[in-house]
Amino acid sequence: MKDLTIDNITENVHFINGQCSDRRLKFIVERLVSHAHDLVRETRLSTEEWMAAIQFLTEVGQTCTETRQEFILLSDILGISLLVDAIDHPKPPGASEGTVLGPFHTHEAQSIEHGGGIASDPEGEPLLVLCTVRDSAGKALEDVKIDVWETDSKGFYDVQYANHDGPDGRAILTSDKDGIFWFKAIVPVPYPIPSDGPVGKLLAKLGRHCYRPSHMHFMFSHPIYDPLITALYLKNDPYETSDAVFGVKNTLVVELGRVEDEAIASKYGVKVGSALMKYDFVLVTKEEALNLRYQNAAAAMKAQGKKMDYLNGLPVPEVD
Amino acid sequence: MKDLTIDNITENVHFINGQCSDRRLKFIVERLVSHAHDLVRETRLSTEEWMAAIQFLTEVGQTCTETRQEFILLSDILGISLLVDAIDHPKPPGASEGTVLGPFHTHEAQSIEHGGGIASDPEGEPLLVLCTVRDSAGKALEDVKIDVWETDSKGFYDVQYANHDGPDGRAILTSDKDGIFWFKAIVPVPYPIPSDGPVGKLLAKLGRHCYRPSHMHFMFSHPIYDPLITALYLKNDPYETSDAVFGVKNTLVVELGRVEDEAIASKYGVKVGSALMKYDFVLVTKEEALNLRYQNAAAAMKAQGKKMDYLNGLPVPEVD
């Protein structure tokens, strides 16, 4: 393999990678190389531009720390994160939709009891969150683990503070026998994604703003249900239709209510007039998700004219 | 822009990036997003796989240091570097071909006089390098700056040593009025590209070896000639046909000779029997290269059915 040219290099790179014994990795790398080479050919990418891209990617990696993940941010602003979630966690009609995880989920959150508070910020407007979690037949789901996280009233997650020394604005709850979970939080605010790094500079060059509409993150896990990574967005937020990371879905937009009477206020330990967020989540089983993922993949492969084998539900080209 | 799905997200990302006032950046990002999304759709990429890719890219960035560029290495082993060079530095018949820069060029090299030595390694086999540099009409080119670099006899560049404190195995020369430049070096050896980082681990997973055939790098610069980044490869090297970075071209493969008589040995200050590498390089002007780059780009765009404007010789979609 010598004398590689603009026209023959792609086939030759495929050939040398063809020895890979991991069929799924081989397939992904084959498609990656084809697309990367086509991108270069279609744009006639210059050496100077490629070196700028190398420099950019290096800075993205080097901006990542224990508490900041700039590559996820890059993936988010290019719409890749939402696309991967849509493919990997397909939802039948009626199930709660997923959205971007974002770069600020941590494994630090502590478990709280129903009614506990997740946020310590005294500047935040108090919010009562009342939710249920059910299956697609409407059955209440007990013992679902729910991870919730949000920013403080200034739009920053706990880990974005230099003096961060423990979780805040985040907690883990477990649904009760009626599928209910509830807690106290603060009303979410719109905020800019971190814009002091290479991804922020790219957004500026693209002429895009870096704001996300007000939202609260939720992640559900249970041994027999497909993990649901989602968020609830506040209606009429100024960034509702221009989220920097493409996360908003109509079914996830909620209108805040108010705690209207003394009985409710007293039951939940809040003041009359407090902001109230209510939502009923619907999970699908892992088996339903796997079947749907497989059906969608098979339909997509057929539409592309490809005959495939499936390994763990993921397509690989047939051999011979 | 809400409710983005597998099918409509790509168009919506293009729409939001359509505000970018830099037409070339807008075009490149548009193609990047299309290819990245197609890659995800074609492979039905899973969340777990995408997170592994994010982790891999983060490690690639974090492996880069002042003296190590792991993203260039990744670009090299995927054949992207060679492709970009082939597009950006097209060569008419008769001109010396280019090849990969590699991640070990530095700006530390010091100027030496003709006949000087570039390598201090006493274990290396002495090599006399005698070259000329001409234009495509055969005219000798004076005052061309030539950057040369190679590994020591163990296959390591100077910057790969922890105790590195200055250039070795590299130097800068200037061609004389007859287009001649010559120096003393050591016979190049095959060597593995750095395999202790994420790119090395990827190569192992792909079932590929990490060796480059024996070679010496050359980079030519002159105000009116197109920069030539190239290398000479030794004939019959065990890795001649399986270079980990796809750099070998037949016109760049040389057979080492020997200094056969006392007159030559005395003239160049070496021993009779010393290894000898001779090569005549041919440069093209920046104007020739620009014209050829434009012709090739226009032909490629036409073949893709695209009508384009050109900014600084690089294509951008026509507006309206």
Image (tube, coloured by chain):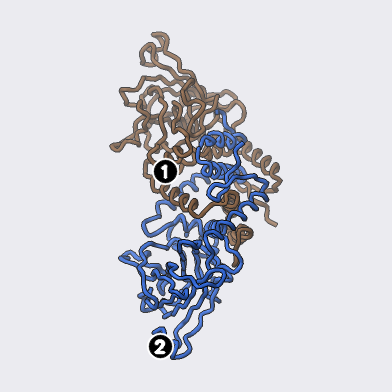
Chain colours: A blue, B brown
Q: Is residue A85 left or right of residue B274?
A: right
| CA–CA distance in space, label 2 to label 1 | 57 Å
Residue in front for this viewpoint, A231 or B18: A231
Q: Position of residue B89 (x, y in %)?
A: 56, 36
The answer to whether any part of residue A133 appears in the image is: yes
Whether callout 2 and callout 1 share a subunit is answered no
Amino acid under label 2? Ser
Give the residue furthest to the left. B163
Q: Nearer the viewer, residue B50 or B18?
A: B50
Q: Name the element at disc 1.
A: helix
Q: Residue at x 45, y 15 (%)?
A: B257
Contact check, label 2 and label 1, Cβ < 8 Å: no
- Say which mark, if any, is on residue B198: 1
Residue A78 visible from this viewpoint? no
Residue pictured at 53% horizontal, 24% vertical: B140
Image location (x, y in percent) of residue B237:
46, 22
Quadrant of the image for the N terminus of chain A? top right
Which disc number belongs to residue B296? none
Q: Where is residue A59 shown, x and y percent of the image?
A: 43, 51
Q: Amino acid at mark 1?
A: Pro
Residue A205 against residue A171 in the figure, above or below: above
Chain for mark 1? B
Q: Quadrant of the C terminus of chain A?
A: top right
Q: Secondary structure at mark 2?
A: helix
Mark 2 crowd level (few <14, some 14–19, many ≥20, 10 Å Cα): few
> Chain ID for label 2?
A
Residue under label 2: A266
How would you rate the neighbour count of disc 1 (Cα within 10 Å): few for under 14, some for 14-19, many for 20 or more? many
Q: Residue B225 at x, y = what percent?
A: 54, 34
